[in-house]
Amino acid sequence: MRPVVALMFPLALAACATQQEICIYDAQQESEVLRELIRDTRANLARGYAVRTEQVVETVEKECVVSDGLGGTMTDTCSEVEVTEEIVPVAIDLDAEAAKLESLERRYARERDNLQEEIARCRALYPEEEA
């Protein structure tokens, strides 16, 4: 569900946001991605393994109401595809995961420092007009 929400927010933002707000939002995206990766990596280390979501597709038989061809309806058996999600544990190299976390945290610190410059650039490029 998270990806759907992530796709909807930029659309809503673009509909009513100023150029400055859009610029600042875009500038913040790298930091947000890094923060999410850091959160996931820390969770992996705390658990001792990673998790992956897999889609499971099954065909199930159900009772359906269908036309009888004479203007009426009748009950029949029909097949329907159901898609569910399953969380699957995945083995990881904990030393490599710890190294990845350190690298992500260093990159996040650099990105956070650059973010203030990017926000200032957005404000200079797109000054807000006072109402």
Image (cartoon, helix red, strand yellow):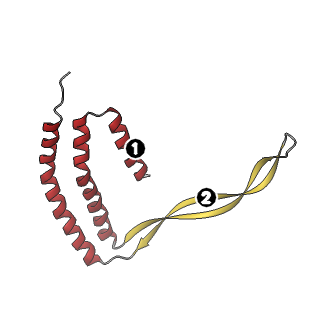
Q: Which mark is residue 102?
A: none
**Residue 103 percent location from the top left of the image:** 19, 68
Is 54 on the left-hand or right-hand side of 37? right
The residue pinned by badge 1 equals 8
Q: Residues within 10 Å of mark 2 (few under 14, many from 20)?
A: few
SS class, disc 1: helix
Q: Residues within 10 Å of mark 1 (few under 14, many from 20)?
A: few
Position of residue 74 relative to residue 103, above or below, is above
The residue pinned by badge 2 equals 82
Q: Nearer the viewer, residue 61 or 111?
A: 111
Report the quarter where the C terminus lies. top left
Residue shown at 24%/70% (left/top)?
Answer: 100
The quadrant where residue 81 appears: bottom right
The quadrant where residue 125 appears: top left
Is 20 on the left-hand or right-hand side of 13? left
Residue shown at 23%/48% (left/top)?
Answer: 28
Name, please, the residue furthest toward the front: 125
